[in-house]
Image (cartoon, rainbow, N blue to C red):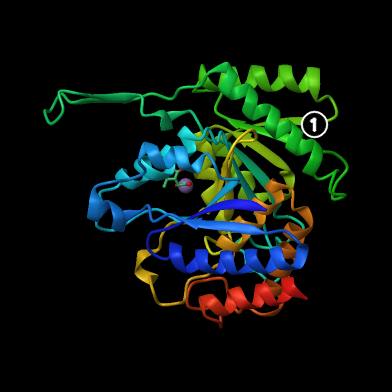
Amino acid sequence: MYKIAVMPGDGTGPEVTAEAVKVLKTAATKFGFRVDLTEFDFGGERYKRTGETLPDSAVEELRKFDAILLGAIGHPDVAPGILEKGILLKARFELDQYINLRPVRLYPGVETPLKDKGPNEIDYVVVRENSGDAYTGTGGFTMKGTPHEVAVQTAVYSRHQVERCLRYAFEYARKYGKKARGRGPENTLALCGKTNVLTYIYDLWERAFHEIGKAEYPDIRRDYYHVDATCMWMVKNPEWFDVIVTGNMFGDIITDLGAITQGGMGIAAGGNINPEGVSMFEPIGGSAPKYTGKGVINPLAAVCSAQMMLATLGEEKAATAIEKAVMYVTANKLKSLAAGRMGFSTSEVGDLVAEKVAQ
Ligand code: IPM
Ligand code: MN
């Protein structure tokens, strides 16, 4: 029995979350486990009503769950940053979800903007550090509103933060790298940094990367790329990548690039993982407010988030069945992954996946 907190959130979040929950319940029945779901209404509407984002009491309550399934946070009537910082980043930080795991995998039948690349080439994972960098809110203004205004926002990393992320990434590469999955001759971890300009932050990352790699993971090949070059090779030679590890800011940016190469926000899923605590799974796209309530949004990213949640909880068989069902649906059913062009409604896509999981 798993206690799952469900936070559908804003915009199309509730529609896609409903489909993820549908698939989750089907998988539970089929694979013999139970899910006890509790819904929370944190998001833009609640903020508008009550001024509340994610109160401390809610964080304490969320700690009691086995995992959190999140739809989307972001509301057109709320100034940027309030809900993001107040809900999404607060949950990530307070629950110390220090890994943001984002697979970049092109499923069969899905169109990619990359010429001559298919599911064999676009198949890697980004381990994005999720607790530090420019995301910590360190900084401020002086002389705000004057011509001499100065704004500072500092990227911050401790050796401890970097090490725990690197160890997770090395372990992940050992377990799920290309060799481990029978897809290549070796397991590779690539550090994505900017050692030529960010000579403090990424110097720390690079030293820790090689020290830990050499001492504890000699079986894993280590590569290094600057972030700008990473973007180039993700487009030109995505097959070079296996597991990529990087800081929070670069991870944010390169995973949107990765997402579009795997078919876009309709399919890209991620996990905010605390390996020792409560993790939270979410589609990596936003709340897509313009599609709200139309039943045209693609729920597969939310379904894949639920799939990652089950894999993390140890329900590997159910997770594999969901991924296979998603692959069946992309290969045989959907016309496109884009909102409104799938050939099916949001709930029909959920039904297609659920039916396949139940078989
Ligand atoms: C993401 C999003 C968030 C981030 C925003 C909404 C704060 O872009 O999950 O990638 O920057 O982490
Ligand atoms: Mn992002």
Tally the marks: 1
Q: Nearer the viewer, residue 67 or 145?
A: 67
- Left or right side of 171 for 36: left
Depicted 18 relative to depicted 316: above or below: below
Tell me residue 89's x, y (percent).
Answer: 43, 39
Q: Residue at x 35, y 69 (%)?
A: 290
Q: Amino acid at mark 1?
A: Arg
Q: Residue at x 70, y 60 (%)?
A: 117
Q: Nearer the viewer, residue 266 or 23?
A: 23
Residue pointed to by mark 1: 221
* Quadrant containing the C terminus in the rendered view: bottom right
Instruction: In the displayed orientation, state which residue is furthest to the bottom.
Output: 343
**Can you tell me whether the CB of the residue at mark 1 lies under 8 Å from the nearest atom of ligand 1?**
no
Q: Residue at x 57, y 30 (%)?
A: 193
Tell me residue 169's x, y (percent).
Answer: 69, 34
Instruction: In the displayed orientation, state which residue is furthest to the left.
Output: 146
- Left or right side of 111 for 288: left
Q: Residue at x 41, y 42 (%)?
A: 58
Tell me residue 316's x, y (percent).
Answer: 77, 53
- Left or right side of 93 for 109: right
Q: Secondary structure at mark 1?
A: strand
Tell me residue 257's x, y (percent).
Answer: 54, 51
**Mark 1 packing: few (<14 Cα in 10 Å), some, or many (20+)?**
some
Q: Nearer the viewer, residue 293 or 178?
A: 293
